Image: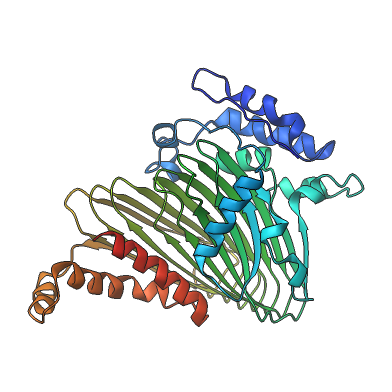
Amino acid sequence: MNVAVAKTSSSQPLDELFAVVRDRLPGLGKVADARQNAFDDFTRRGLPHRRIEEWKYTDLRALLREVAPLAPAPDQAAFARAAKAVKALSVEGTQKFVLVDGVFAPQLSDVGVLEKTIQFRTLREILEDVGNDTRADLLQTRVASDAMISLNAALATDGVVIDVADGASLARPIHIVHVATAAGASAVTRSLVKIGKDAHVTLIESFIAADSAKSYQAHDSIVIWIGDNTRLQHVRLMEDARDAANISTAIFTVGAKATLNTFNLTNGGQVSRYQAFIAVAGEHSRVETNGVNLLNGTQHADTTLFMDHAVPHCASREVFRAVLDDRAHSVFQGRIIVQPDAQKTDAKMMTRALLLSDDAEADNKPELEIFADDVTCGHGATTGALDESLLFYLRARGLTERQAQALLITAFVGEAIESIADDNVRDVAIAAAERWLAARG
């Protein structure tokens, strides 16, 4: 299905953005109504700005200015460029689901060789299924309310809907790959992953660009349900083009006795925000969230985490690292909420920023909202430069200044990267960090 290109110049009202593409987006009836309601909500709010507390460091009215027109459906040339970009990822042994400019690409995906415990459909296919009375629910978000989430629900063109069976222990990670090939356009995707109880799953998300992709926008949302006694390792690698924008939301619901280990690495894009809403909904579960921003030039990257402890006897750990060079700007906001019934909660958060330039900026805002009285909670934040004595020590042993810096930076981000349990996936994250270090010269 082709998607019309919408003009979004600053002189054009926001409602015209939706009107141009509304009849071409998948889904009629209740789906169309859900889209309209979502876009009405976005129109009322507009792009988030600094007067909104959760967005005070990432003013999209200044940084993004406007929503780019939706990308047209990719042609064969676009798929060919996307194939080269996917091959360059060099991530072997996964079960790939590839989205090109917001459209699922079966010819680049592994849908024919999926493990038997995985059921898969595209979001577009479900939204167009008039016999499915619950299809509009796929565009609803009850855990969080946000203007960019509403924009995503209104304009989502495609995505993947994955169901992993109870008791499944996947031999190969699930890998959702977002590839941009169009210039000056938006790709709007929405995916949903449901993992049954007693399952063991590794999920990777990659955001990459083909050679021709410039000045594009990626607007993504993923909703993940984690069953009781299930283990999920989630790794997100954002390596978009340097002049791109990426606004992504992840919404997790964690069952009882479950373990979620999630890691995010951002080293691409000019403007980005990754916001994760994690609802700890089952007792005796544990969540570990780790993240790294590697930024230089004038990059702006925002990582915002909301950890909601709703039930007792659960634990969470947040570890975030940022390395900033030139005039880069990193934002970390972490909010831990302990609800009145969540007694015996054990929650801790630590963020550290390493500044390689006097012009770099790191804003760290850890928050605790505690409404229970029998808990163990804490947070901390530090910002500093490389240790001059350690640099001198390494230089004295024959390393160049850049080599010495690279070694110390690798050690600095290592704690977060080492949280990835799968050796092969950890190597992929390390390789992405090494590419950033190599690009520094």
User: Does the image show residue 350?
Assistant: no
Going by the picture, which residue comes out furthest to the right? 131
Which part of the image, by quadrant, shows the N terminus? top right
Q: Which residue is drawn at 56% across and 45% down?
A: 219
Q: Note whether 276 is above or below 199 in the view shown.
A: above
| Render colour scheme | rainbow
Image quarter in which the C terminus is found: bottom left
Residue found farthest to the top? 11
In the image, what residue occupies the spot 57% across and 20% down? 13
Residue 54 falls in image quadrant: top left
Q: Residue 355: x, y in percent?
A: 22, 58
Position above or below: 429 against 242: below
**Between residues 357 and 214, which one lies in front from this camera angle?**
214
Q: Position of residue 60 (x, y in %)?
A: 44, 37
Q: Can residue 67 be seen in this view?
A: yes
> Considering only vertical position in the picture, is 156 above or below 240?
above
> Relative to the observer, which residue lies in front, 332 or 123?
123
The number of callouts visible is 0
At 63% from the left edge and 33% from the top edge, which residue is drawn?
A: 41
In this rendering, would 140 be left or right of 145?
right
- Residue 73: x, y in percent? 67, 40
Who is closer to the viewer here, 108 or 361? 108
Q: Residue at x 44, y 31 (%)?
A: 65
- Residue 40 falls left or right of residue 213: right
Where residue 420 sits: x, y (%)?
A: 48, 76
Which picture quadrant has residue 334?
bottom left
